[in-house]
Amino acid sequence: MRALITGASSGVGRATAHRLAADGWDLHLASRSAGPLADAAQECRARGAGQVAVHVCDVSDRTAVDDLLSGMPSPDAVVHAPAVLAYGRFEDVPAEVFDASVRTTLHGSAHVAQASLRAFARSGDRGHLVLVGSLLGEIPVPTMSSYCTAKWGVHGLARCLQVETRSLPGVHVSLVGLGAVRTPVYVQAGTYQGRRGRPAPPSVSSDHAARRVVRVLERPRRLRRVGVLTAATAWGHRWAPSAYDALITPLFDRFGLEPDVDHDRDGPGNVLTPTPGGEAVDHRYR
Ligand SMILES: NC(=O)c1ccc[n+]([C@@H]2O[C@H](COP(=O)([O-])OP(=O)(O)OC[C@H]3O[C@@H](n4cnc5c(N)ncnc54)[C@H](OP(=O)(O)O)[C@@H]3O)[C@@H](O)[C@H]2O)c1
């Protein structure tokens, strides 16, 4: 079996690569950073992967994604994980940073989904696309508009593709809705408020999230939520929106953001260009 994992140099993507490697899959690992990808490939070989190839590819670039999928043997599975974001009130986040975040997180998902479905068609309408979504694709959170906008879009895209592929019994599109995972995504993010995020408790490890992704690969799901409060929070927002709106700002300020404000941190983080020094499977949050 052969899988393409985008966003494989860090966090959930890298942990998923480890899990599939241990099951002997052939792996194609993609992200924007060659160094961490090479490290991830080495880790996968050590865990028993079949063939491992790495691809430096920016998923916000449609042509690069098309070239990647048409230049490799058709995958049985594609796990799409990349996301970047910047914290700050909507009016304070520079337009180019907001746009670049949405281009990677939402448009990147569309680019990879379209190229994957075309690759599945070339191999006789067989294949499984797993889009990594988020609880924040179902709820709004203050100072995360770039991410929420993109993730709500990813969830909408996944549902459309699930309906469209109903007539193709060999093609599956699944969505994994993660709650907080202790990956580096929070410290890699940009900020324009002197504070970045942190995983709100109860968070899980990247490997825990990766196990859920692999289970979905074995059994396709419309939406597989991960995290003990994920479903309850989504339902709370849906059925009690006024209470949700009143509570989310103080709760997020207390549990979802760094405690100290330091405007020296302000900047785009890894939104415009990668910061490979910060990539890892998990990050230690205090
Ligand atoms: N961590 C959480 O609490 C959490 C919660 C809910 C959902 N999720 C979702 O889980 C997925 C994985 O996130 P993570 O937490 O594992 O983040 P992460 O550790 O920051 O990993 C993100 C990966 O995406 C890659 N990437 C970023 N921009 C890219 C681009 N334009 N083209 C190609 N690759 C790109 C990064 O590598 P380069 O920068 O080198 O390209 C990295 O490999 C995301 O979809 C995220 O929304 C995470």
Image: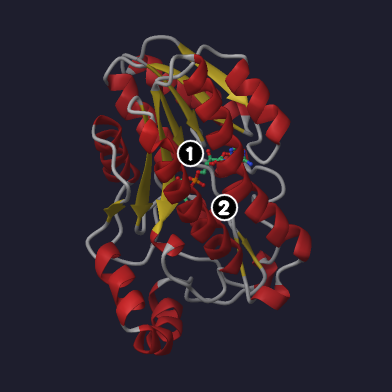
Q: Are marks 1 and 2 in contact (CB under 8 Å)?
A: yes
Marker disc for residue 10: 1
Q: Quadrant of the N terminus?
A: top left
Image position, residue 180 (x, y; %): 36, 59
State whether residue 174 is above or below residue 201. Answer: above
Q: Tell me the amino acid under the disc marked 1.
A: Ser
Image position, residue 137 (x, y; %): 45, 61
Q: Looking at the picture, tell me which residue is in the foreground, 254 or 176.
A: 176
Label 1 residue SS: loop
Task: State which tag comes first along the sequence, 1 or 2.
Answer: 1
Q: Quadrant of the C terminus?
A: bottom left
Q: Is residue 281 left or right of residue 54?
A: left
- Residue 281 visible, this angle: no
Q: Is mark 1 within 8 Å of ligand 1?
A: yes
Query: At x 69% / y 61%, what residue is drawn?
Result: 98
Q: How is the image coloured?
A: secondary structure
State whether residue 108 is above or below residue 269. Answer: above
Q: Is mark 2 within 8 Å of ligand 1?
A: yes
Q: Tell me the amino acid under the disc marked 2.
A: Gln
Q: Which residue is mark 2?
A: 188
Image position, residue 198 (x, y; %): 44, 64
Spatial CA distance of label 1 from label 2 is 11 Å
Q: Residues within 10 Å of mark 1 (few under 14, many from 20)?
A: many
Query: At x 68% / y 66%, what residue is drawn?
Result: 266
Q: Looking at the picture, tell me which residue is in the foreground, 126 or 56.
A: 126
